[in-house]
Amino acid sequence: MEGHGEVRLLIRGVARGVSSLDIAQLFAPYGVDTERIALPRDRRTRRRKGIAYVFVPTMRHADAAIKALNQTELGEKTITVEAAAERPPRRPRRFNGPPPPRRY
């Protein structure tokens, strides 16, 4: 859960009108880095997915944020705050040169 001393939190139920500034203000007492807030979008539709990720400096800050903000209201919707799951390690990509020429 911790990487580089930080803990990544997942916020579910984020309303579409909520900005990263709104999230930064809500999480400010817990030491959130305003540069490290992500509001993912769907690749195909480019609409927000309704989730956000924030990074807090320590597990102590993460626990405090979860206890205080889980099941609270943000942008007229109830949000759920939890520790984000570990990302599986990425396999390195291989580059084997240019693709073979096309035959028409």
Image (cartoon, grey):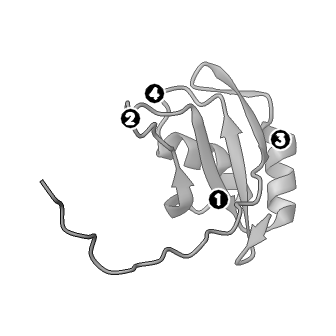
Badge 1 crowding class, 10 Å Cα cut-off, few under 14, some 14 to 19, many 20 or more, is many
Point out the tag, 4 or 2, that comes first from the N-terminus: 4
Residue under the point 70% across and 46% down: 10
Q: Nearer the viewer, mark 1 or mark 2?
A: 2
Q: Where does the image place residue 69, in percent across and percent down from the top left?
A: 77, 38
Q: Determine whether the residue tagged by mark 3 lies in a helix, strand or loop.
A: helix
Quadrant of residue 32 within the rendered picture: bottom right
Point out the tag, 1 or 4, that comes first from the N-terminus: 4
Point out the tag, 3 or 4, that comes first from the N-terminus: 4
Q: Is residue 86 left or right of residue 55?
A: right
Q: Nearer the viewer, mark 4 or mark 2?
A: 2
Q: Amino acid at mark 4?
A: Gly
Q: Is residue 38 visible?
A: yes
Do the CB atoms of the residues marked 1 and 2 lie less than 8 Å apart? no
Q: Where does the image place residue 47, in percent across and percent down from the top left?
A: 41, 31
Q: Amino acid at mark 1?
A: Val
